[in-house]
Image (spheres, coloured by chain):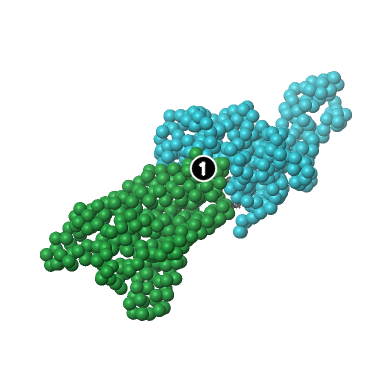
Chain colours: A cyan, B green
Amino acid sequence: MSLGSWAERTTPDGAPTAVVPSMDASTMKLRAGSPSSPAVHAVDLAKRYRHTVALRGLSMTVRRGEVFGFLGPNGAGKTTTVKLLLGLARPTSGEALVLGSPAGDIETRRRIGYLPELFRFQHWLTAREVLGLHAKLLRLKRRERCADEALATVGLARRGDDKVASFSKGMQQRLGLAVALLGEPELVVLDEPTSALDPVGRHEVREIVRGLKQRGSTVFLNTHLLEEAEQICDRVTVIDQGRAVATGTLEELLGRRSVRLRVSGLPNGWWHCYARFGTWALEGEWLRLEGAATEVVPDLVAAVVAAGGRVEAVIPEHQTLEDRFLELLEAR
Amino acid sequence: MSPTVTIAALTFREAVRRKLVAAFLAITVALVGLSAWGFERLSHSRSLSSAEVAASLPQALILFMFMFSFVVALSASTISSPAISAEVESGVLQAVATRPVRRFQILLGKWLGLAVVLTAYAAAVCALEFVVADLVSGFTPPDPAGAFGYLLAEGLVLLTAGLLLSTRLSALATGVVAIALFGAAWLAGVVGTIGADLHVAALREVDSIARYVVPTDGLWHGTIYALEPRSILANAIGHGSPFYAGSPPSWAYLTWCAVWVAAALTAALIVFERREL
Ligand SMILES: Nc1ncnc2c1ncn2[C@@H]1O[C@H](COP(=O)(O)OP(=O)(O)O)[C@@H](O)[C@H]1O
Ligand SMILES: [Mg+2]
């Protein structure tokens, strides 16, 4: 099975993530910058550095209001992609629209918050002064209140008047998060936001991201942490060696699901009559129904009971994200 | 407030907060103290006639100001060399550059902020030194404002060169190159003076080309001229020494210096605009 067909399988509704169209008339419409335009729409992005090719034809769409996970191993091209989207670097070829405007557009930046992977701030300023600077550049009104709110959100309320130089790495990352949250941006781009945080900090970041989603913001989350993607992302694109290898919701990504079943009171081989539910396999006392979605469980149980069987246990199972991730990367 | 002014204010605040200004002021006070001692010894010298003292006071001031021109050059390249590269390398600039601010506004803001720092510093140096010279020896240069202006212009040339270099080179490399340029330009000026004395056209040629390529030494001669009283000029005392200027820089030359700074700043803008962060 080719990866392309896998991608199509994961998005049966033919969403643009499966096969991203080239910049045609429909894309031009997205440019208008209407609220209905996707948060991010990238087509065939390629980025070549002198000795390395960081991105080779990356296409993806991030919908408004979703928490989008950009998942890949180190060096996959996540940070490069983000830099292209924010206009810090220029693509070798390809194009990207962010909130309906070409990547890097100055006015659109007002609506984007960004936590860089290398989060560093003017260490001779206090945290509050750093936020004040960014609030000024964003031309926010009521700058002090915005700064206070952002500090409180990331748990730095009591350290606001301390110099950044006195902050631990984790606190600096929290400050970076506060900077990214300033001014209620429509799109928040977080490049490995928990790399310096302890478990409590990671949990708080998850809560912050959920809060952003509730507020209606779109979150673009770069991560190599599977559990992070699993816990907070609505949809995920897996990237490896500069290419998107899979896109979909976690449900879709973890496509190979099965139901394990223990039934008594029926003659051996009874399951041959139930091939419509999927492919059966005998595993000792257990039966495994491959390719079954959780939705079939009630019907399946009803059918078995109707036939006179006694259902002792039903366990819906799916592949772990880690298995799937490794499988995807190995397939390349 | 426009983003340019915001960045300029930030840059100024950085120089103050990081104690750069304090460090240079401390050096200045020490050097001014040293010069006070020198003026004191000179003006109360028993081995010199009063005419000789009158002639040597301006030359002593020129010598001290040469030292300060070196300190100003050093400070100009010190504050400008980390301006871009160091912030790109550390990642500080990435967070700022993704805000609704254009690259040229960042660079221009930094130039403005650093220029204000340098102006304040050069003004402090000149005011201190001239007041001390006057108090201790009674000598006042004929054109103190001019001397300050040329010194500042010299600093701004190096500041802009440093900013241009820092869009590409590391802070250390920028600092070294900027100071090397300053030293080479001064040396070319000395070579030119020797060439004029010995009537060697080739050596004079070196100077006349160098003062267009790196206009710091040409401007330094403006400072010298502004410090020379009429008595020195009329008798051409010190003619043939690198610390003598027979005439002020021409308007054409000053225009060239302004064009030079504008061109260097434009080049810096273009390089920075293209740089990937
Ligand atoms: N400025 C650069 N110059 C040269 N190569 C780079 C540069 N930035 C990134 N790369 C290369 O591009 C690839 C992707 O890097 P990156 O986007 O940082 O990966 P990720 O963020 O997924 O870990 C890597 O091989 C990296 O070495
Ligand atoms: Mg990265």
Q: Nearer the viewer, residue A63 or B196?
A: B196
Badge 1: chain ID: B
Residue drawn at (77%, 37%) of the image: A15
Q: Where in the figure is residue B25, as x and y percent of width and height?
A: 31, 50
Q: Is residue B195 above or below residue A290?
A: below
Q: Is residue A313 left or right of residue A181?
A: right
* Residue B118 higher or lower than A317, as above or below: below
In the image, what residue type sits under mark 1? Pro
| Residue A75 visible in the displayed image | no
**For the view shown, which residue lies furthest in the left direction?**
B46
Tell me where residue A5 appears, x and y as whole percent: 79, 44
Which residue is located at x 48 percent, y 36 percent? A131
Can residue A47 be spotted in the picture? yes
Left or right placement of residue A191 versus residue A308 in this view: left
**Count of marks, rendered view:** 1
Q: Quadrant of residue A260?
A: top right
- Viewer-proximal residue, B100 or B128? B128
- The secondary structure type at the circle numbered 1 is helix
Q: Residue furthest right?
A: A273
User: Which image quarter: residue B8?
Assistant: top left
Whole-percent x, y for residue A187 in the image = 62, 36
Residue B149 on image: x %, y %: 36, 56
* Direction from residue B141 to residue A200 in the image, left or right: right
> Which residue is drawn at the image coordinates 34% and 73% (left, top)?
B193
The residue where tag 1 is placed is B3
- Mark 1 crowd level (few <14, some 14–19, many ≥20, 10 Å Cα): many
Residue at coordinates 64% horizontally, 34% vertically from top-left? A218
